[in-house]
Amino acid sequence: MTTRSFVALLALALSASAIHAETTAPCPGNADALGTARILAVDAATAPRVGRKHFRDTLALAAKEVVLTFDDGPEPGSSARVLDALKRECVRASFFLLGRHALAHPELARRALAEGHTVAHHTFAHPLLDRMPVAAAEAEIDRGFAAVDTALYGRSERVPRTPFFRFPGFASSPALLERLQQRAVVVFGADLWASDWNPMSPAQQLHLTLGRVEANRGGIVLFHDTKRQTAAMLPDFLQALRLRGYKVVHVVPAQR
Ligand SMILES: [Zn+2]
């Protein structure tokens, strides 16, 4: 081998290891962590509505990639346990907060943000927006945006810092979807959900959710961090994903 080709090979090896380090950064204190495999920037111009439970399209995920999402928090107790489980595995998720809960527990909202999660929006008080006049529904959405951003950043603007929104109960309407798209807000549905609004044991919750992940080969998974059964099974769920070869994708807003 010539010196030149050796140097070229060395450079290749170094760049490959740099890529490896970026995608599988070591997780402090946990050599067997699931980790976060990659970051996916999402914007309303190319992905205005995602999640095949309700929409035609979903995120550009490969087979066995999952996006973990949690609705309705923050809630003392369960949300902190969820954050603890994610932190232990160096997994980054997305939280769709209720404005009233963010104002009641801003420290939990800020903890999620500080630990690198995407912190997004789910209205102020969780009404079913398709049953309200459009103007009232949009005011409710805006009140949620303002409350969450005030809890997180101490101030809010008309466009939320993270323009991701999920309808309570998936109760969207064509008029509201149109308004949100005009405002460049991405509407998240889900590809599968944990049905954790139904009371069940953590073991049942784990079994049900893993089965759905396997049946769908990944996708956007919807949980509620307000549910103790979800918080209780999450450590086992994350390790099961790792053992079955699933990868976590962290969705973030595209740079504007
Ligand atoms: Zn909800």
Image (spheres, rainbow, N blue to C red):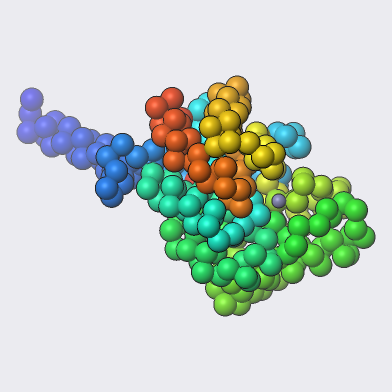
Which sits in the foreground, 119 or 233?
233
Residue 12 horizontal side relative to residue 194, left or right: left
**Which residue shows up at 83% across the image and 53% down it?**
128
Residue drawn at (56%, 70%) of the image? 106
**Quadrant of the frame with the N terminus:** top left
Of 177 and 244, nearer the camera is 244
Kindly identify the residue that appears in the image at 86 percent across and 48 percent down.
174
Q: Is residue 168 above or below residue 244?
A: below
**Residue 213 seen anywhere in this rendered image of the structure:** no
In percent of width and height, residue 235 lies at: 44, 40
Q: Is residue 26 visible?
A: yes
User: Which quarter of the figure is the C terminus placed in?
Assistant: bottom right
**In terms of depth relative to the viewer, which is nearer, 236 or 42?**
236
- The residue shown at (43%, 58%) is 115
Residue 119 in picture, x, y percent from top left = 57, 58
> Which image quadrant is residue 159 in?
bottom right
**Farthest residue, direction bottom:** 154
Q: On the rendered structure, is 173 left or right of 10? A: right
Horizontally, residue 30 falls left or right of residue 184, namely left
Q: Residue furthest top?
A: 215
Quadrant of res 99: bottom right
Taking the image as shown, residue 186 lies to the left or right of residue 76, namely: right
Total tally of numbered discs in the picture: 0
Q: Position of residue 240 (x, y in %)?
A: 44, 30
- Image coords of residue 31 (percent x, y): 27, 40
